[in-house]
Image (tube, rainbow, N blue to C red):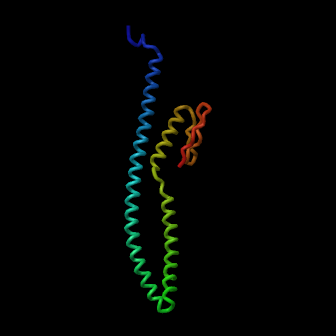
Amino acid sequence: MSESRFRPEGEGLLTLVRETVDGIGRLISEHLTLARLEFQNDIKSYGRSVAVLLLVAGIFVLAYALACVGLALFLSRFMHPANAFFLVAGGHLLIGVVAGIIAVRGLRDTQPMHETVSEVERSVSALASASGGGNGVAADGGALAHQKSGGETWPAIRR
């Protein structure tokens, strides 16, 4: 008699469930590995940018200081020396505020861990569609909607 004849039917289902759980575990592990690698890459990139920015800022501070003193000394021929120094300082303060606003806007445009978010969205979408639910992705490809599974509402993943 063959072995398959004595195997209960639940064992085949158990094998499928075990393989599915192993696959989901591998998927989660790969997502965590991707997130870790992308995070490390982002940190290295930000570190290099900050180092260059600090070097350039140091050079500009020295150049600004020398230029300010020279301009104030030149303007002191036409007005009181203290007023000349305050005029130069006020102008450079205004320039510094504008430059700071531009720098903050540039930092807001960066999207750290963008690839990880999109991969997680794809995985959740695939799992939702495989389980019979909708794909969970907004029409514009943006943030996931709340997903319902048996009466439970799962939190959305947002960019």
Near-viewer residue (38 or 100): 100
Residue displayed at 50% across by 58% down: 109
Q: Find the residue positioned furthest to the front.
A: 82
- Residue furthest toward the right? 151
Residue 147 location (% of width, % of height): 58, 38
Decide which of 49, 17 is in the foreground and name it.
49
Toward the viewer: 137 or 47? Answer: 47
Image coordinates for residue 101, horizontal then vertical, percent: 52, 67
- In the rendered image of this protein, does residue 126 appear above or below residue 60? above
Q: Report the label total.
A: 0
Tell which residue pokes out farthest to the top in this image: 1
Q: Quadrant of residue 57?
A: bottom left
Give the percent coordinates (x, y) of residue 142: 55, 48
Q: Is residue 151 left or right of residue 21?
A: right
**Which is more toward the observer, 93 or 33?**
93
Residue sitting at x 46%, y 85%:
72
Q: Residue at x 50, y 63 (%)?
A: 104
Name the residue: 41% across, 49% down.
38
Position in image of residue 52 (x %, y %):
37, 64
Task: State the quadrant of the N terminus.
Answer: top left
Q: Compared with residue 36, is residue 49 higher up or lower down, i.e. above or below? A: below
